[in-house]
Amino acid sequence: MRKEFIYLNNELTSRNEIIRKMSEDVFTYGMIIDVDTYVNAVLKREEEIPTTVGFNVSIPHGKSEAVTEPFITFMRTMTPFVWDEKSGDKAQLIFMIGVPIEQKDKLHLKILAQISRNLMDENFRNNLLEAESTDEAYRLLKRIEENIYAEEMGNL
């Protein structure tokens, strides 16, 4: 989780544009080596099973050789918008995950579990919706990373 990967009050309202924007930014930091390959993997996953999880939240991700370093990006849009045309599910809080293919099973599931666990907490969701600065959102989101690290340390 990096502050550079937190986007608040973004005006984008297209799933594909959001996935591309976040992927391009991650690419500039060398965490993926090919934007198109990664975006295509994420969109393929969306077509198979949409990544909306309720509460106007989506967690897009995809298996791709293009990911070189694990990352989580976060975007809060100005308003909820239709993320999945088929179901009509909406999103306003978007967490995009990237994990190197060799870590995809173990780390990927831990990240998804931690994000989901935190999102079950209404106060956490409300705090993300009301965060007034990137620093404030970063402090909230850093909790997810810290919980993953603590879980890893407990398994050693």
Image: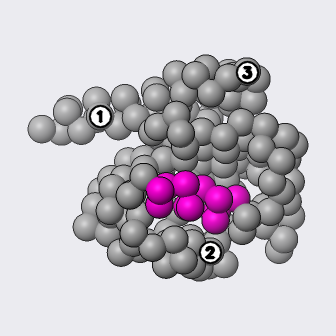
Residue 67 drawn at (x, y percent):
38, 65
CB of mark 2 within 8 Å of CB of mark 1? Answer: no
Q: Residue at point 86% right, 64% down?
A: 88
Real-space CA distance between mark 3 and mark 2, rounded to the nearest whole angstrom: 30 Å
Three-letter code, disc 2: Leu
Residue 99 drawn at (x, y percent):
38, 59
SS category of the residue bearing label 3: loop
Three-letter code, disc 3: Glu
Q: Residue at point 84% right, 71% down?
A: 85
Q: In the image, which is nearer the foreground, mark 3 or mark 2?
A: 3
Which quadrant: the C terminus? Answer: top left
* The residue stretch that appears in magenta: 18-28
| Residue 132, numbered label | 3
Determine which residue is flagged by label 2: 43
- Is residue 100 at least partly visible in the picture? yes
In this view, 9 is above or below 132: below
Residue 1 sits in which quadrant? top left
Query: Badge 1 local density, few (<14 within 10 Å), some, or many (20+)?
Result: few
Three-letter code, disc 1: Tyr
